[in-house]
Image (cartoon, helix red, strand yellow):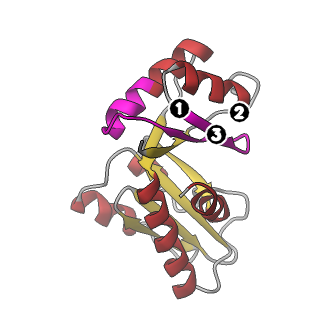
Amino acid sequence: MPTYLAFLRAINLGAKRVFPKDDIRRAVEDAGFDGVQTHINTGNVRFESRMRSTSRIEAALESAFAADRGFEVPTMVYTAREIASIAEDARALDAEHPDLARHYVYFVKNAPSAELTAQIEATATDAGEMVVRGRAVHALLGPGYQDGKVDPLRAAKLIEPTTSRNVTVVYALADKWC
């Protein structure tokens, strides 16, 4: 059975959007998915499904999460093969940019068009650059990029809905689940 990874957006960021990983696991299982596992408490889920359409899986999970929590939880779903490829791209980008202060990966529902890709990549400044690789957008941030800001280049608004993870989490997930 195919393995998928889901990335939940904007959970556990305050008192109103609480969704503990054990509850996430239960909601995914209740939605009919198998082999459910979570990684840390930031909305990273691994599961198996006979469904082949990531957009159908996203819709099923978003519906289950809304019913369980009472608020919308935008969810981006990828195959394990896609995540392995994203991690491989990230490692290559890290090797090409050895002086990075931070590297975030933004997960998006649909690959940006060529026009949108150009807009995203045009947000580059002295602080860093955005690199689009299919359904993953890499924020490559140099020293002094405004520590603590996840979107210092203000590119995330161009790719909504999205959720980001530090590249170390991406590597951990690829090593653990792919």
The reply to whether dot 3 and dot 2 touch (C-beta < 8 Å) is no
Residue 21 numbered mark, or none: 2
| Residue 143 seen from this side | yes
Q: Amino acid at mark 1?
A: Asp
Binning the other alpha carbons within 10 Å of mark 2 as few (below 14), some (14 to 19) or many (20 upward) gives some
Q: CA distance from mark 1 to mark 2?
A: 16 Å
Residue range highlighted in magenta:
35-60
Asked whether 175 or 56 is in front, the reply is 175
Q: Residue at x 24, y 56 (%)?
A: 113
**Which residue occupies the extreme right position in the image?**
15
Q: Which mark is residue 37?
A: 3
Q: Position of residue 111 (x, y in %)?
A: 31, 54
Asked whether disc 1 touches disc 3, contact meaning CB atoms under 8 Å apart, the reply is: no
Residue nearer the viewer, 121 or 38? 38
Look at mark 1 in the image and give the residue it sits on. 34
Tell me what residue is drawn at x 47 percent, y 51 percent: 107
